[in-house]
Amino acid sequence: MPGAATLHLADGVALLRPEEQVFTAMLGGFANQQLARNLARSTVEGRENTVKAFAAYVNAFPWQWTPAMVDEWLGDLRSLRDLKRSTIRSYSEAVRAFCHFATDPLYEWATTCEERFGSHPVQVVHEWNTAVHVQDNEADAKKRAFTKAELHAFFAHCDDEVARIRAFGRKGWLPAFRDATLFKTAYAFGTRRNETRMLDAADFGRNPHGAEYGEFGLCRVRFGKAKKGSPPKRRSVLTVWDWTPDILDEWFTDVRPLFGVEGSPAAWPSERGLRIGCQRLNSRFIAYRLALGLDEGLDFHSFRRSYVTHLIEDGWDPRFVQEQVGHDHASTTSIYTCVSSDFRTRTLRRHLDGTVAAALESQNRRQS
């Protein structure tokens, strides 16, 4: 069985540093068990690092852990480091998953620890000492969508920076142009940061029902947000704004070839690698936001929030918007905008219309 003690420790072999070596072997088994469940390697590595951090904080090995240690650790994370609720909960879930693995008799780690150290691991993360997920949305309340005026100012600043850098004869205008087009594309198709970053030139294509958009009638998102144990989720996003083909055509026809990346599939090539990294995008975005004095609640994901909000505000069908952004449930889409459901909208409109009609009828009676 993946992760079993017998696969990581040889019976009857003396260890030089038994506590450290057994703990390392347990972590290796934990990683194998999660990989066998098809969890992403980044998820596995993140959980492993969290377990290591907890062990270092309490200065104890898993067969010595107690619930009180978890209480102290999580309390410190909340009070001193001021981590977000969702982050703290993910940390506690990582330790819970590790303890569940280590105490499962099928993997024989409890027996191994009992034989070697006279003690065995127990589950230390319980309902009474961890936070409960009670809301569908626990995002930072400061995070929000751009207003249309803010979005216009942001994109105008992107273009101004390209012109300014180019006027000085610097090569940096190419990356600035790339990032400006990438930002506009993220808003044009409501894509997440990694979804946008991972686009290839071949991911843009025609929409037979929207011939006016030419070669850029749709965007095939191949690296959508995945569910646990599943590959990236794919979807096709249809072009909805008439300015989108123009900015993409200029980029792919006139500017991208200047990067000298012939043969590269990446839509947004990097100067030093295959494609641009997330950190570079964040740095550019924050620099522009600070230059404009915009609210710190705006981040890259605000392009996606703005896409949903602006389409709903402009009267697009909520189900269409939900399909465009790849949400399984309408309630998820409603988190992005104040227009949360057709029911609320229809109810408000019906009462407003009734109020106006009643006022007009009363006025007509008085006049007659």
Image (cartoon, rainbow, N blue to C red):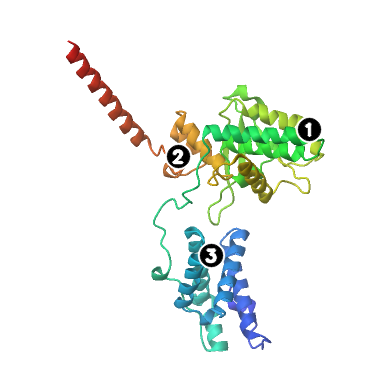
Viewer-proximal residue among 243 and 147:
147
Q: Are marks 3 and 2 in contact (CB under 8 Å)?
A: no
Q: Are marks 3 and 1 in contact (CB under 8 Å)?
A: no
Alpha carbon of mark 1 to alpha carbon of mark 2: how far?
A: 40 Å
Please say whether residue 1 is visible from this viewpoint: no
Please say whether residue 282 is visible from this viewpoint: yes
Residue depicted at x 49% and y 58%:
86
Using residue 50 as the reference point, say whether residue 198 is left or right of it.
right
Residue depicted at x 61% and y 21%:
212
Point out residue 179 in the picture as x, y percentages from the top left corner. 69, 40
Q: Residue furthest top?
A: 368
Within-10-Å neighbours for mark 2: few <14, some 14–19, many 20+:
many
Amino acid at pointer 3: Arg
- Disc number at residue 306? none
Residue depicted at x 67% and y 86%:
15
Mark with earlier residue (3, 1): 3
Using residue 43 as the reference point, say whether residue 268 is left or right of it.
right
Q: Are marks 1 and 2 in contact (CB under 8 Å)?
A: no
Point out residue 33 in the picture as x, y percentages from the top left corner. 57, 67
The quarter holding residue 203 reads: top right
Alpha carbon of mark 3 to alpha carbon of mark 2: how far?
A: 31 Å
- Disc number at residue 81? 3
Mark in front: 1 vs 2: 1
Residue underneath mark 1: 167
Viewer-proximal residue among 279 and 52:
279
Above or below residue 216? Residue 220 is below
Point out residue 321 in the picture as x, y percentages from the top left corner. 49, 35
**Disc 3 on helix, strand or loop?**
loop
Within-10-Å neighbours for mark 3: few <14, some 14–19, many 20+:
few
Within-10-Å neighbours for mark 1: few <14, some 14–19, many 20+:
few
Residue underneath mark 2: 337
